[in-house]
Amino acid sequence: MKNTRVIKYLFSAFFVVLAAASCKNGDGAVTASGTFEADEVTVSAEVSGKLLSFSVREGAEVRVGEVLGQVDSVSLYLTRLQLEQEIAALESSRPDTAAQLDVMRIQLENARHELDRLSRLLESDAATQKQYDDTEASVTVLEKQLISTESSLKRSLAGIEARIAGLKIQMEQTDDMLARCRIVSPVDGTVLSRYAHAGELASAGKPLFKVADLKHMFLRAYFTSGQLKDVALGQEVAVTADFGGGNVREYAGKVSWISAKSEFTPKSIQTDNDRENLVYAVKIAVENDGYIKIGMFGKVSIR
């Protein structure tokens, strides 16, 4: 019975040592391997039309906001001119409500003064009742006309303003489309691939070129669950880039991302464990001195 317990203990100890050996190298450092990557952005055409110019060159450095091409925008420009003319015509057709209403208010005020004068004359029999009644009726008519005209002018002005507002929205949409005719770089980086040339027809959504920031790259390495306890966000680590033929270069790296989900070891990654082992992807940010290339093999060491 005692021998059985000893054997079980020795087997347990053996597997613990074996697991530790798979996670750490001879000097006690946790190591993992992977490939170097960069944040790549594929820039696509936002409008359809002929590429009047397209100065993108593979390998060229570009700056964020730099204009690299232009899609034909003549039709959009003409549309904008037409909208400007329509807006100008509507603005000139605005009724001069103040002037029109002022004239009617003066007429009404004069009629009321005349009614007051006739009222006094009527008391002294210097005016007839018919004169008073006719003037009173005129005042009533002018009051109603003033209210009706004011309401009509407000409706007319509101309709014109609504049409102008709608045209201005169309103009803003046209301006947005005109801006989209300019092909600009969304980031600072290096052009990796070019998919179009000047003179070709571009359609909205068609990829034009791919750009990536190669100065700030990262190594996507894979750690086992046993190794993950030694990895933390923001941790400074040593990264080695393998240039082949035993030529390596070491860089300072920092853990910038740890996957929350495990996955099977990618076929492109070689590990000492079986292919079926589950691993966690970890990104290690590295400042590139120009030697690291996308897809290059690398290792990370954590002490």
Image: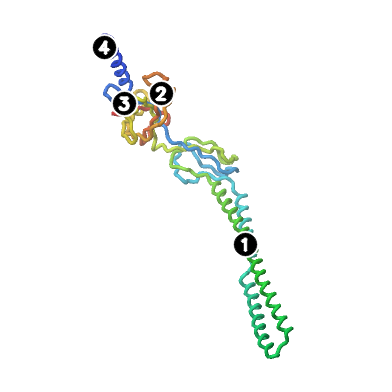
**Mark 4–mark 3 distance (CA, rounded to whole Å):** 31 Å
Answer with left or right where residue 303 lies relative to residue 154.
Answer: left
Task: From the top left corner, tell me how far across and down residue 240 is, in percent.
Answer: 34, 29
Task: Classify mark 4: helix, strand or loop.
Answer: helix
Q: Residue at x 60, y 43 (%)?
A: 48
Query: What SS does tag 1 mark?
Result: helix
What type is the residue that disc 2 sits on?
Answer: Leu
When the figure is inspected, residue 214 is found, relative to residue 113, above or below; the finding is: above
Residue 241, quarter of the rendered image: top left
Q: Which residue is mark 3?
A: 30
Residues marked 3 and 2 touching at CB (< 8 Å): no
Label 4 vs label 2, nearer the camera: 4
Q: Which residue is mark 2?
A: 278
Question: Dot 2, how many residues are within 10 Å of its Cα: few (below 14), some (14-19), or many (20+)?
Answer: some
Dot placed on the residue nearer the N-terminal end, 4 or 1: 4
Q: Secondary structure at mark 2?
A: strand
Q: Which percent across, then down, holds residue 66?
A: 47, 46
Q: Amino acid at mark 4?
A: Val
Q: Is residue 251 left or right of residue 42?
A: left
Q: Which residue is mark 4?
A: 6
SS class, disc 3:
strand
